[in-house]
Amino acid sequence: MRNSEIKNPMIILCGGRGKRMGKITNKIPKPMVKIGKKPIIEHKIKFYQSEGVKKFIFCLGYKSKVLKNFLLKKKKYKSIFNDAGLKPGILKRIFLVKNLITQSTLISYGDTLAKINFSKLIANHEKSKCVITIVAAPIQNPFGLVNWNSKGKVIKFKEKPILNHFIGYAVISPNFFKKINNRFINLSDGKGLVKAISYLIKKKQVNIFKFNDMQITINSPDELKHAELNYNKYFTL
C-alpha cells in the first residue's frame, strides 16, 4: 500500500567524484553504480516514491549529463536539476538551491539508501523547532577504543563500543542558511556541512532522528559487494 503524498521536496546530492570506488566510477557517477540490474539512484527513487515523496531536486556535478539523461528517461516525478560542477562541497551545493527551500526539505546523499519513514522524519523535525534534523543510526566499532593522558597512562578503555553515526539523511528548514556563518558555505567536500552542524549544535538548533533499520551506503567496491549480497533482504532487485 502506497503512503499518502508528501508535499515536501527532497534534495538528492549527486555531485561527488566517488574516488573510493576506483575504476567503477571512471565513466559514470556514483549514483549510477548498479545494485543488481538497476543503479542505486533508481532504487532510491522507487523507494522514496513508495513513501510518498514526489518532488526531487538533483544537485549534480561529476558526470552530470550521464545522470541527468538517465533520470529524464525515467521521469515519472517532478524534478529540478542544478549542475554546480566538480568543485563545490556539499553545503555549497545545497546553498545553490536555497531559493527552492520554502518548507521543510529532505536531504539525501546520492550513494545511500535507508528505509526511513519520511512522514515521521518530517513531523519529528517540525516538532523540534530546530533548523536541521540529522538522521543517526547505531554502529558497533570493530575495535577497542583507548584514551590516555599526557603522561601516557590509560584513563579509559572501551571494547567495541556502540557509536551513533550520521547516515546521510537530514531535513532542513527555510531559515537554515540564515542561522549559519557564511564562511562555511565555500568549504570543500563535507567540511562546510560539518562546520555548520557543529556551529548550530552550540545554538541548540540541531535535532536528532534515531534510526535503526535497513541502510545501504556505497563508498567502496567492498561496500558495493555487501550491498548486492544484502539488498534482497529488504527489496526486490
Image (cartoon, helix red, strand yellow):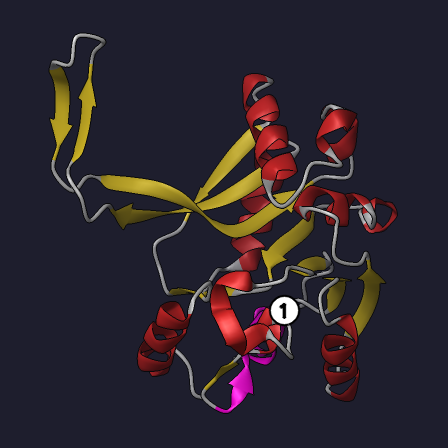
Q: Quadrant of residue 129?
A: top right
Overall secondary structure of the magenta section = helix
Residue 143 image point, x, y percent = 18, 44
**Left or right for 55, reference 122:** right
Q: Quadrant of residue 36?
A: bottom left
* The residue positioned farthest toward the top in the image shown: 151
Residue 32 image point, x, y percent = 60, 78
Residue 199 image point, x, y percent = 60, 22
In the rendered image of this protein, does residue 149 appear above or below residue 90? above
Element on which disc 1 rests: loop
Q: Is residue 27 magenta-colored?
A: no
Q: Which residues are magenta?
A: 37-52
Q: Which residue is mark 1?
A: 52
- Residue found 62% across the figure and 38% down from its top: 193
Three-letter amino acid code at the position of disc 1: Gly
In the rendered image of this protein, does residue 86 appear above or below residue 137? below
